[in-house]
Amino acid sequence: MLVPEKEARRVYAKNFGGNGPDIAVFAPGRVNLIGEHTDYNGGFVLPMALPLVTVMVGTRRDDGKICIVTTAEGADEPKKVEFKTPSADSPLTPGAPKWANYVKGVIQHYRVSGGPVPGFNAVVATSVPLGGGLSSSASLEVASYTFLQQLCPDDGDLVQKALTCQKAEHTFPGVPCGIMDQFISVMGKEGQALLIDCRSLEVKPLPLTDPKLSVLITNSNVRHELTGSEYPTRRRQCEEAAKALGKESLRDASMEELEAKKDSLSEVCYRRARHVISEIERTTKAAEALENGDYQLFGKLMVESHNSLRDDYEVSCPELDELVSIAVEVPGVYGSRMTGGGFGGCTVTLLETSVAERTKERIKEKFRGSPSFYITKPSAGSGVLPD
């Protein structure tokens, strides 16, 4: 966390001078252990917050203007934007650069209780890789909301905070995401993965503190982009399948019901639904396995999840398939799968701590790319950095 904070403060001094910044906040990225593309189907997910964070530092200004600078590698130009604070007559609208839309959406939808959002200067720095499937977008949204809470407090409702950040992503970047990413960035707990019911938003914390167990994230460094057509298309296919099954969402459907109605679905919608229904079941089984310390079963379910994402949901890619294949060959690896929206990004691997370095070396030897690695444990959700 110190690296992006230090960078943000340095760039703030360069751009704005003065004695600031007065406010410094952070929000984590996340890795999803299992439960992919189930959140917008009302299902279960099992993510954990990461020590990879987005930091936002800044100071209030009183001229009704907002100026934001990003240092994020891979963010589109320009890296500095300035615009007026929103009002009823003049709301914010999305535009270029794309990165600023995630912040603008949060500002526009912020649930302020004491008047309009004031102007401010701010710098954003992050250690969450953009396009890596570790939710750089949600961490930026939640950091922005946490920053606004210091400028003009809301009512403190954490669930509404996550929902507002989700709304911002729907309306400004135009990504019809589920609630998982924003929710875990707000609600993350140190040492715990969270089983989240994406319909009721009920949460069950699951300790992940066994020192003999580690989570290895491998970034393929193949960049994914969710604002294209693939993500909305998958969501639409799921909605079509639910409608054909007579269900509000695929959360309500069983595999038996899907098989009984197979002929009334297109082949593609059938496979999309088969992934979601089976993935919801896998996620609840995985949570039970983690609770019982049955890491072998958890790993088996991870591999099944990856195969389903590859074959039925078609959101994997050759690089992710290769990373999973290499990892599971290493003794002491329980399981591995792609994580995030897909089409690139990262894999997540559950393994014995003692074989983490060996697994990294094996991947470096055999993978036809330039991967990067994070060996990690569950971290805390968003908050304020000390002075």
Image (tube, rainbow, N blue to C red):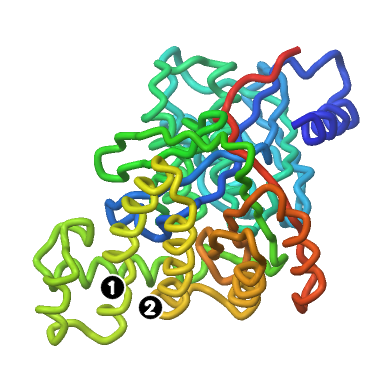
Could you tell me which residue is drawn at 59 percent across and 58 percent down? 349
Report the front residue among 33 and 25.
Answer: 33
Q: What residue type is labelled 2?
A: Asp
Residue 14, given in percent of the width and then of the height, sits at 90, 31
Q: Residues within 10 Å of mark 1 (few under 14, many from 20)?
A: many
Tally of marks? 2
Drawn side of residue 193 relative to residue 246, left or right: right
Q: In this view, does 226 lie above or below 63?
A: below
Report the front residue among 260 and 110.
Answer: 260
Q: Is residue 35 above or below residue 64?
A: below
Q: How crowded is mark 2: few (under 14 residues within 10 Å), some or many (20 or more)?
A: some
Res. 77 image quadrant: bottom right
From where the camera sits, is residue 140 visible? no
Drawn side of residue 364 relative to residue 188, left or right: right
From where the camera sits, is residue 187 visible? yes
Q: In this view, does 323 lie above or below 148?
A: below
Q: In this view, does 243 lie above or below 189?
A: below
**Which mark is on residue 237?**
none
Residue 176, given in percent of the width and then of the height, sits at 40, 56
Q: Are marks 1 and 2 in contact (CB under 8 Å)?
A: yes
Could you tell me which residue is drawn at 64 percent across and 72 percent down? 329
Report the front residue among 176 and 33.
Answer: 33
Residue 149, given in percent of the width and then of the height, sits at 53, 20
**Which mark is on residue 312?**
2
Task: Give SS at disc 2.
Answer: loop
**Which mark is on residue 274?**
1
Distance CA(mark 1)–CA(mark 2): 7 Å
Res. 297 image quadrant: bottom left
Q: Which amino acid does label 1 sit on?
A: Arg
Could you tell me which residue is drawn at 38 percent across and 21 percent down? 157
Res. 203 image quadrant: top left
Q: Which of marks 1 and 2 is nearer the N terminus?
A: 1
